[in-house]
Amino acid sequence: MSPLMTRPLLFRLVSVVACAVGFYLPLAVVPMFAGSAGAESSAGWANAALLLATVATEMATPAIVSRFGYRRALVAGLALLGTPILLLLTPAGTALVVVLAVNVVRGAGFAICVVAGGALTAALIPTERRGEGLALVGLVGGVPALLALPLGTWAAPHWGYGAVFVVTALVPLAAVVTVPALPARDASSEASHGLGRGLRRAALVRPAAIFAASASAAGVVVTFLPLAVADEAGWVAPTALLLQPAAATLARWAAGRLGDRRGQTRLLVPGVSLSAIGMAAMAATGSGILVTIGAAVFGGGFGLLQNATLSLMYARVAEQDYGTVSAIWNGAYDLGMGAGSIGVGAVLSVSGFGVAFLLVAATILPALVLARSEGRPARRPAGHRTGHVAVAA
């Protein structure tokens, strides 16, 4: 069996960690900064601008990679993710238009990092261990993300906004020095089919849609769960929000190992089922025990789908289309989270949190149909090659 950890992948993990820190450390701090500057009513637009810019640039990144190659795209992404935040330390930095502009540029940088970097990462992992490798990368990036978000909100009032913003700028820039050590894969030399054609391929859209159904619920959990259990004991919300990503990380690792050995499609139905069951359990907002158990169950399903859908999509394309897969999957992730938050926000005007959470669980269930269809062996014409695409070392 081919070794999983290679020197190029080790260098790639450095930029994975840097990207996670650069994105999550100021994620809650920038709205806090806008609010402290007297823009409380508009502070929420800061991360909305970040999300919109991220989704838009994710769709454009395959073309960027095709023109400039993976390494130059990744350098640009890291620079755009970190450097612009230093503008908030200037005299004009408190203006809302500057805050929004900074987050738009940072969102574009993050999108380039995750799409171009994700495609390059997939090319560095042995094909027969792709699921396990993606799980490892998810773990390496997930732990810093989990720690950076609360660290930023703690550091801002204790050390000042300037300290958070300087670290946010320096960490991605420091990772730029590792990019030349990555393989010089140039996507412009390959005949990529492009994003438009990728979106017309049901074999890619179906797994992305399955994952988006679970991602929409994840957006609801992050946004509304603390509000839904505000009247419960103080331990409920933080415990649930810790168990959900922790369970997702463990499930993602398990999915990597099981999927490589038994097939990724076998994990789709359990992933969707656990997502729906966990979301339904969290609808019992009056019971802290059920909410925390539901968060853990949901996290397990979400983690299974994270790894299984991405691994499955990479297995269905040639290496030159890894950027397209990364863009579609990340777009499904972000759009799903945004749609869930917006949808529940609208439902809450006519119902309570419990009913809204049950409706979210119900919206996950149609994904079971897609998951079951993915698990059925496809009928292939004679002479069709069923093997995985080889990945250059």
Image (cartoon, rainbow, N blue to C red):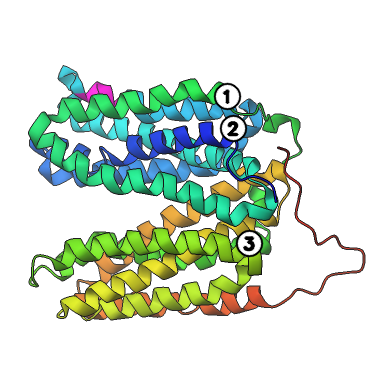
Decide if residue 75 is in sight here: yes
Q: Position of residue 149 (x, y in %)?
A: 25, 45
Assess whether mark 2 and mark 1 are in contact (beta carbons under 8 angstroms): yes
Question: For numbered disc 3, what is the local secondary structure?
Answer: helix
Label the magenta part by its dominant secondary structure: helix
Q: CA distance from mark 1 to mark 2?
A: 7 Å
The answer to which of marks 1 and 2 sits earlier in the sequence is 2
Q: Is 244 on the left or on the right of 330, as rendered?
A: left
Q: Quadrant of residue 43 in the image?
A: top left
The front one of 142 and 5 is 5
Instruction: State the residue position of label 2.
Output: 8
The residue lying at 54 percent from left, 43 percent from top is 118
The residue carrying pointer 3 sits among few (fewer than 14), some (14 to 19) or many (20 or more) residues within 10 Å by Cα, namely: some
Q: Secondary structure at mark 2?
A: helix
Q: Nearer the viewer, residue 28 or 242?
A: 242
> Which residues are the magenta region?
84-88
Query: What amino acid type is highlighted by mark number 2?
Result: Pro
Q: Which amino acid, by three-letter code, is at mark 1?
A: Ala
Work out how far the residue at label 3 is from the one at label 1, CA to CA, in angstroms: 28 Å
Dot 1 lies on which element? helix
Callouts 2 and 3 close, C-beta under 8 Å: no
Q: Could you tell me how far apart the alpha carbons at marks 2 and 3 are, in whole angstroms? A: 22 Å
Where 214 sits versus 152, above or below?
A: below
According to the picture, the residue beneath numbered tag 3 turns out to be 260
Q: Which circle's residue, 2 or 3, is located before the other in the chain?
A: 2
In magenta segment, residue 137: no
Q: Residue at x 46, y 40 (%)?
A: 111
Amino acid type at image mark 3: Asp
The residue drawn where x is 66% and y is 52% is: 198
> Residue 181 shows which numbered tag?
1
